[in-house]
Image (cartoon, grey):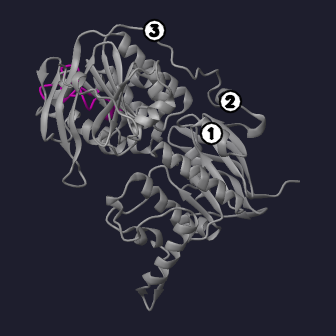
Amino acid sequence: MENYIVEMLNITKKFPGIIANDNITLRLKKGEIHALLGENGAGKSTLMSVLFGLYRPEIGEIRKNGEIVKINNPNDANDLGIGMVHQHFKLVDIFTVLENIILGVEPNTMGFIQKKDARKKVVELSEKYGLRVDPDNLIENITVGMQQRVEILKMLYRDNEILIFDEPTAVLTPQEIKELLQIMKGFAEEGKSILFITHKLNEIMEVADRCTVLRKGKYIGTVDIKDSSKEELSRMMVGRDISFTVQKEKREPGEVVLSVRNLTVQSKNNKNNAVKNVSFDVRAGEIVCLAGIDGNGQTEFVHALTGLQKSTSGNINLMGNDITNASIRQRSINGMSHIPEDRHKHGLVLDYKLEENLVLQRYWEPEFQKGGFIKFDSVRKYSEGLIDKFDIRSGQGPITIARSMSGGNQQKAIIAREIDKKHELLVAVQPTRGLDVGAIEYVHKQLVQRRDEGKAVFLVSLELDEVMNVSDRILVIYEGEIVGELDPKKITVQELGLYMSGAKRDNIKENNNGE
């Protein structure tokens, strides 16, 4: 008989209108990396939240080393050596890195916090595991990748031996993902046991020993990775075969929809320019992708394009109209749809209902209001149609509070809203972040469909496969400048990488200025 460090037996967890976990059993061996795979809303995060004490199941029991344990809250979990890195980090922005790591377990003498010993332990842990951070930096001033390191150090500081990673790579750059997977392998070799929630099949094939698959809250099966394949896992996850290639016909672009000329945008973090004199066009019937390593000006460029940030100089034209200084609503009315990079900050009002979020860009239209009063029946009918069409899974349908939905279904809601409203230009920033393979396939089809309908699509992505497979033309940004304009059919991923790292650049000024 196998010895398991953790057993979750016959776990059932219900929420209003939905059984999130329906009689699920999961067993974790000591020293293994065990992946948990499932569609958006399949119940993965809920199951891990039960193990971490954030939820209490209606039915089922948890065992550690064969003994039944009660986990009523995260403190109980920590006492049992269970730690968790959440999909949306649980950090205090105005606290330092060190203060976040020791929060709740502060070493103190006579009520006074003793930071010196804590700092020493944090520095030793960060060096040992290659998680280098500045203990005195404020959380609000560090990158998402650094914030994740802080979350991992929180677990290590508490000497956790069972580590839960909930979608840990969803917000990381390719380089950061590579580093994280290496760190996870190191943890397993040291004897720590890891539960790893992810949608990315490549990552599972690379680091996991076994994988448990959930579908619509039910247990489908557990497989040994060495005996499995991406195709088998995707079939188990969504119940059908998934195409990993994007199907699109060759198409001649039409008129210019978006024209950017000599755009310069200041960095949010300092007085330097994050975007420097950028010029290009996007035409009807084409998908143009802005590719680059994270932090090379993409965020500031998109914020200037969509009205979230003022540009320093230059012009933006949409359908022949100068929108450089237009409001966000005016840009929307003029034909721009925007799937934002940060779905919580710029995509949703988290404490609004799903139906209210689905009409955020249109509630002032005659279809949804009369005399300044919202026509709630129309909003309900419209939102139910979008929920069905885009397979947005939520416990209470249109009246579900957005905050309570899974990250992937929050993303689907934004995509549904932006794609369905009238637009000539779709700005899609990391549109498949946090989505499962079935949803990614669907989103890629939607982007291609917009292009085939004669719309212009401006895609910003850190996923190299997505960049190569979906786009018709690639613009590479490096340190705020466009350094290459590439045809994905004529270059390799390796060549694209050279441009992204600044090792190669084209003299494309003439093309960019439209001369």
Q: Which of marks 3 and 2 precedes in the sequence?
A: 2
Q: In the orientation shown, which residue stands out farthest toward the right?
A: 1
373 or 4: nearer the eye? Answer: 4
Question: Magenta span has 357?
Answer: yes
Label placed on residue 236:
2
Of tags 3 and 1, the one toward the viewer is 3
Distance of mark 3 from mark 1, alpha carbons? 32 Å
To which residue does mark 3 refer? 249
Residue range corresponding to the magenta coloring: 355-376
| Badge 1: residue crowd in 10 Å (few <14, some 14–19, many ≥20) | many
SS type, badge 3? loop
Q: Are marks 2 and 3 in contact (CB under 8 Å)?
A: no
330 or 97: nearer the eye? Answer: 97
Q: Is residue 61 left or right of residue 514?
A: right
Q: Is residue 473 left or right of residue 333?
A: right
Q: Amino acid at mark 2?
A: Met
Residue 215 in the image: x percent, y percent?
63, 34
SS type, badge 1? strand
Distance of mark 2 from mark 1, alpha carbons? 9 Å
To which residue does mark 1 refer? 37
